[in-house]
Amino acid sequence: RLSLEEVKRVKRHPVSVLLHNVRSLYNVGSIFRTCDAALCRELILCGFTPHPPRKEIEKTALGAVETVPWRYFPRTNEAIQVLRSEGNKIFALEITDRKRNYTTIEKDDFPLVVVLGNELTGIDQDILNLCDDAIEIPMFGVKHSLNVAVASGIVLFESIRIYRKLFLGEI
């Protein structure tokens, strides 16, 4: 377990999460906590996604607001433009006609930003059009969606597993 000082100095995984118009403060807090556990590079909050300081975020983040680097952009398209200029690939986590499984991330896809959308409406088409690709988690039941915080954890940890295998030789 890293101390607060160590976590500020450690090299983070080259995977970030961008939240586009996520409405639930509790989901945002939960995603902060997952980003901390995964040692992701940063969390980018956009549009009407709530951002710190908010007690509801802190309630589920359990201190992760202090350990996860984060930025807020009022406009998601501007965030994507900045992130792309920093050398990131931008992947939407959304069911689209592209049908790329989230387990197929490759070496050239890093550093990676995973975009997650609103709990009810997903990612707006204009934002999807700005993404380099779209990935999805296969659904097998009646419901064809997961809670945004759950989905972020699945994709974040799988992306990091792939990164560590490809770049660090871990199995």
Image: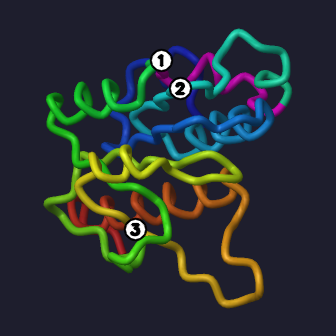
Q: Are marks 1 and 2 in contact (CB under 8 Å)?
A: yes
User: Neighbour class for label 2 at 10 Å: few (<14), some, many (≥20)?
Assistant: some
Q: In this view, does 5 lie above or below 15?
A: above
Which quarter shows the C terminus? bottom left
Residue 60 x %, y %: 81, 33
Please, what secondary structure does the residue beneath circle 2 have?
loop
Label 1 to label 2: alpha-carbon separation: 5 Å
Whichever of callouts 2 and 3 sits on the residue coming sooner in the sequence is 2
Residue at image position (59%, 35%) is 21
Residue 28 as seen in the image, left or right of residue 109: right
Extreme-bottom residue of the structure: 140
Colour setting: rainbow
Residue 15 x %, y %: 37, 45
Residue at image position (61%, 25%) is 48
Amino acid type, callout 1: Pro
Residue at image position (85%, 26%) is 59
Q: Which of 139 and 103 is in front in this view?
A: 139
Q: Give the range drawn in magenta.
A: 60-71
Residue 74 image label: 1
Tell us which disc is closer to us: 3 or 1.
1
Amino acid type, callout 3: Ile
Residue 135 image label: 3
Q: Which residue is label 2 attached to?
A: 47
Q: In this view, does 25 lie above or below 58?
A: below
Residue 58 x %, y %: 78, 22
